[in-house]
Amino acid sequence: MDNLNVQCGTAFENSFNYFLKSKGKHIISFVNPFSYYQLKGDSKYRDIDKLFSDGLLLCTLHRIFFRKIARASFDFSSVADFVFEEALHQNARLAIVGATDDENRKAVDIIERKYPGINIVYTSNGYIKRDQLLLESIESVMPDLVILGMGTPHQENYALFLKDNLHNDCLIITCGGFLTQTSIREDYYFPVVKKLGLRWLQRAIMHKHVRKRLLKEYPLFIIRYISENIYHKLIN
């Protein structure tokens, strides 16, 4: 059984800095119970260079069957602050694509206010109708870092499209719902939510699509993940 190669969150900072400074095009993305089997089921996603666990549930199950890993999520309770601080420190040329026009504008305004001097050279909503046109627009500004917030599998698919077609070296990183969340509130998660590890509950209360995932997709993921890994261990 070919499981996804999910990395420990403690390796995120080194991976990010290595890819940002190295030659070539690289992708960092994040996986959760909703996206796990979407990415596992298609071999093209093996071209994603690093995958990290976006949530404690997958971390817990991974620890039971394989090894202990830490969470790494693209939000201000995890790795987002590091990403923007490093982009500012290294004067990286940054493209931010995702969410609606209004959400993107609000999120970018917050990021620019939070990190004065950050070099954001391109922004766009995530509802892409002409891939080639957006590719040409991104390529014209030659970004060092592209952040994509389109939801799975769209953001991963577009990350792979950019990796295959951009001519300049860059790091492409997915951010899921980060832009939408940031447009709602600068520090989206309330302090007590972060302290108690209840980020999933806040999202469920605030967003209907998250409630649907928790009630439908997550239980199915748990059953499938546990049964497959128990079977794999029994036959090996």
Image: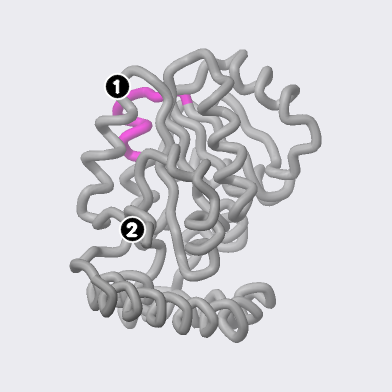
Q: Secondary structure at mark 2?
A: loop
Report whether residue 196 is seen: yes
Toward the viewer: 38 or 75?
38
Residues in magenta, as a range: 84-93
Q: Is residue 134 above or below residue 70?
A: above
Prevailing secondary structure of the magenta residues: helix
Front residue of 36/53: it is 36
Marking on residue 72: 2
The residue drawn where x is 37% and y is 50% is 51
Q: Residue 217 sits in which quadrant?
A: bottom right
Left or right? Give the position of 64 relative to 43.
Answer: left
Question: How far apart are the alpha carbons under marks 2 and 1?
Answer: 22 Å
Q: Judge whether residue 88 is colored magenta.
A: yes
Residue holding disc 1:
22
> Hey, which residue is sitting farthest front in the picture?
235
Check the image and report above or below for 86 versus 166: below
Q: Label 1 amino acid? A: Ser
